[in-house]
Image (cartoon, rainbow, N blue to C red):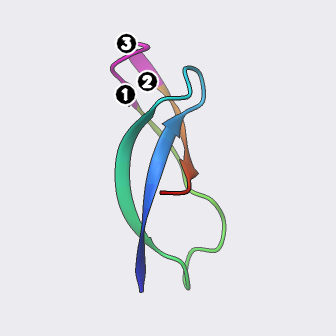
């Protein structure tokens, strides 16, 4: 039931994090503010296909 997704930084477009979500309960794409080690600051990370 749970799908593996990647989180991509919106500024540098690098894929820094991976996580799992339940697609049946969460229909919209995940957006989280996380630390990007390449930008060296907290940026918005959006869900992309694994």
**Secondary structure at numbered mark 3:** loop
Residue 37 among magenta residues: yes
Q: Kindly state the secondary structure of the residue where label 2 is placed.
A: strand
Task: Tell me, yes or no, whether the highlighted magenta stretch contains residue 49.
Answer: no
- Which residue lies under the disc numbered 1? 35
Give 42 or 15, whichever is nearer the viewer. 15
The residue located at (38%, 16%) in the rendering is 38
Q: Quadrant of the N terminus?
A: bottom left
Q: Which residue is mark 2?
A: 42
Which residue is at a point 36% across and 43% down the rendered structure image?
A: 17
Query: How many residues crowd mark 1 within 10 Å: few (<14), some (14–19), many (20+)?
Result: some
**Label 1 with label 3: CB-CB less than 8 Å:** no
* Mark 3, residue position: 40
Question: Of the residues under marks 1 and 3, which one precedes in the sequence?
Answer: 1
Assess disc 2: are there few (<14), some (14-19) or many (≥20) residues with their C-alpha within 10 Å of its C-alpha. few
The residue stretch that appears in magenta: 35-42
């Amino acid at each position: 039931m749970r799908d593996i997704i990647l989180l991509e930084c919106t500024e540098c477009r690098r894929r820094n994090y991976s996580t799992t979500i339940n697609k049946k309960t969460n229909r919209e794409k995940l957006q989280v503010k996380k630390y990007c080690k390449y930008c060296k600051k907290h940026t918005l990370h959006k869900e992309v296909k694994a």
